[in-house]
Amino acid sequence: MPRFRSISPVQLKEGTRLAQLAGSRRSFVLRSSSGRGDATDAHVAWVRSQLEQQPEEVKVYHHHEVVAIAAACWNEASRRLERGEGVSVLSFPEAEGEILRKVAETMMLLTEGKLEGLSTRDRVDWKVQALKKGETWLLVIDCKSPRVSSDASLLELAASSLAVLRCQRWVERVIIGMRVCPFTQSVSVAATGLSKVGIAPGPIGYPVCHADHVVHVLSALWNTISDMLSKDPTELSTVLLLTPCFSQDDFPRYAAASRVISNALLSLKAEKNISLVFFHPFYEREAVFPVNDPTHGHLPPENMLRSMLLNFYEIEDVMNFEDNLHQNDFSRRSPMPMINLLRTEQVELAEQLTSGAKVYCANAKRMAQADRTALLRGLASDMAAPQLSQDKDRPF
């Protein structure tokens, strides 16, 4: 299961920060109605008796909520991939079979030939099934792939601080400075200016996942969702999950993987609680499938954006910048791959003040009218390793 570290925006001295990062590893603990793995020996023995191929161990979860079930499944998938060839079995006496079927279907997208464009680096040779035995549903992961580690080195853990600093510098320059999000005015606080619709400001989380495989990233994602939803919005409003080691220089690979990530969320209807927004240093909407149709977590396609613009601007105005609409990609170009997790309820309430379509169009116009050289230089600066500030009053 991927190790990742959540860094607060509070400034620390360089030696203290690196020592803390190098000396600790954190993974989120799942919450269960009855605790994790609390099955009786008799139940485990019964599960084994129902299986032709014996697993290394049987784990039993008394989860019934979608997010907890998905997190348990993807965590085990991540552990299975770390161990390599073998069989893992999860038993869910209280879960609905449809949830496990959808999880299994998404995992099977990672097998050969299931998803066009998926990188060979993210393919997994496994068979994943949701099986009903008696009144109990099982998730069976039969893996033939060699092991793929998700452990971060001490150097990578120490670099987590720099990843967060680079991200916060980009948030200040682009998200705040270029007004990409009208409700973010600080690198540490989100949901500003939404009190009229009953939303109080809350902290922004910056967890870092160092994994370089989509299975490990999905494990980190579901753990982050679980952690986020377990907190009040005033404790954690939104999260930027930083994945600096995952497909940093390969956007087509990232775009294909984002389809698996979105499918994992949408197939379980978890978008009712959490919405995703994808960012990447080389983000290019035309490399995202489907090219001409909207898809969760990505910018509107350019053909759709042109029509949207005419709802807010005069046609003469649009004609002055429409040739540069491809520069709208810069609103999603970040110093490293990352996934923004938003609370769907907050997004829907914010729509009462300003529509998402209006925000998209304002950003598209602003980016199209910006100097391309300046945009490229700004991104290059964000991607460069920052100096750790000694000024305690600065956020980074």
Image (cartoon, rainbow, N blue to C red):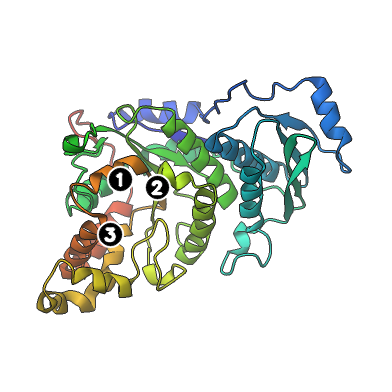
Mark closer to the chain start, 2 or 1: 2
Residue 331's disc is 3
Relative to 350, say whether 8 is above or below: above
Q: Is residue 343 visible?
A: no
| Nearer the observer, 25 or 255 | 255
Instruction: Write down the residue under mark 2.
Output: 275
Horizontal relation, residue 166 to residue 54: left or right: left
- The residue lying at 38 percent from left, 32 percent from top is 7
**3D distance between C-alphas at marks 3 and 1:** 18 Å
- The residue lying at 49 percent from left, 39 percent from top is 155
**3D distance between C-alphas at marks 2 and 1:** 8 Å
Mark closer to the chain start, 3 or 1: 3
Quadrant of image for the C terminus: top left
Mark 3 is surrounded, within 10 Å at the Cα level, by few (under 14), some (14 to 19) or many (20 or more) other residues, namely: many
The percent coordinates of residue 42 (x first, y second) are: 83, 22
**3D distance between C-alphas at marks 2 and 3:** 17 Å
Quadrant of image for the N terminus: top right
Relative to 307, say whether 208 is above or below: above
* Three-letter code for the amino acid on which mark 1 is drawn: Val
Q: In which quarter of the view is residue 99 placed?
A: top right
Instruction: Write down the residue under mark 1.
Output: 347
The percent coordinates of residue 46 (x first, y second) are: 85, 29
The percent coordinates of residue 231 (x first, y second) are: 39, 27
Please identify, in this view, whether the residue under mark 3 or under mark 1 is nearer the observer: 1
Circle 3 sits in a helix, a strand or a loop, which is it?
helix
Please identify, in this view, whether the residue under mark 2 or under mark 3 is nearer the observer: 2
Residue 150's disc is none
* Three-letter code for the amino acid on which mark 3 is drawn: Ser
Q: Are marks 2 and 1 in contact (CB under 8 Å)?
A: yes
| Nearer the observer, 355 or 52 | 355
Q: Is residue 323 visible?
A: yes
Circle 2 sits in a helix, a strand or a loop, which is it?
strand
